Image: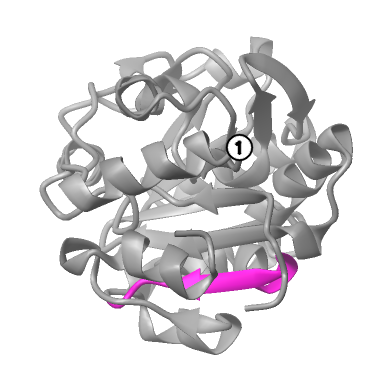
Amino acid sequence: MHTVYKIVFFDIDGTLVNEEKQVPASTIIAIQQLKRQGIEPVIATGRAPYFIKPLAEQLGIDSYVCLNGGYAVYRGEPLYRRIIAKSSIEALVKLAAKHKHSLVFEGEHNYFTDTDNDHPFVVGSISSLKVDLPAYDPDFWKTNDIYQIFLHIEDTDEHLYEELQSEFKLIRWHQHAIDVLPAGGSKAQGIAALLELVGLKPEDAVAFGDGLNDMEMLSYVGFGIAMGNSHKDLLPYADHVTTHVDEDGIRNGLITAGLL
């Protein structure tokens, strides 16, 4: 590699952590090495900020792009917010109620469901993240900025929401859950805001990901790396495919990028 990269963005699930939500030892060491070299590690995730604090503290990372690009923080200071219009949320709430589908509204500091939090789809999807279940408040969206929404449906019901495709972008992350973002939303938006703040260009950056919500991010940066365990539809967007998360995927990708 000829380029000297200056910043690296890491997805969490399937990238920094494995199926058990554990960080491989080689990944912890690799991130410590990056920091010693003055290269900034940044988390870039679909998760909300309140879902990632233990991991960020474990890795000593204080810059992150959360909520699929909707909320960005640099060294502990919020720098970018992308919220969903209330009129769009209202249309989604009405449609989901019509079809009896559960929603979860994600704000800056907490999140709430509009149905019982013992709904099997809510429990199944959110428990897979190994975070606390949301409390119940169907009106939370009316009085708080909402950055992302979970829509709990099976893939056979996705067509029911086609009428909202001009207002929303839907990305499946679980067999029973979809991330709902504003139309055109992606991790790349939050990354662009952060890079602008620190005076870096996209070509100065490396990014690692494994899921459908990582397409724009891997395309946007100078060197996009897909994990060996990635969704097959992500692979065309990557400059390189590294090994599986549990087979030193982060470390090997950083070596390929010339950073270790």
Is residue 235 positioned above or below 111 on the image? below
Q: Residue at x 76, y 58 (%)?
A: 204
Q: Quadrant of the N terminus?
A: bottom right
Q: Give the total number of marks visible in the rendering.
A: 1
Q: Which residue is mark 1?
A: 38
Describe residue 167's horizontal placement relative to residue 112 as left or right. Answer: right
**Residue 227: image x %, image y %?**
36, 71
Give SS at disc 1.
loop
Is residue 189 positioned above or below 213 on the image? above
Residue 192, visible in the rendered structure: yes
Coloring applied to the structure: one colour
Asked if residue 122 lies in the magenta stretch, the reply is: no
**Residue 201: image x %, image y %?**
85, 55
Residue 113, visible in the rendered structure: no
**Residue 4: image x %, image y %?**
70, 62
Q: Residue at x 56, y 21 (%)?
A: 107
Asked if residue 226 lies in the magenta stretch, the reply is: yes
For this rendering, which residue is in front, 248 or 155?
248
Residue span colored magenta: 219-228
For this rendering, which residue is in front, 11 or 157?
11
Q: Residue at x 25, y 38 (%)?
A: 126
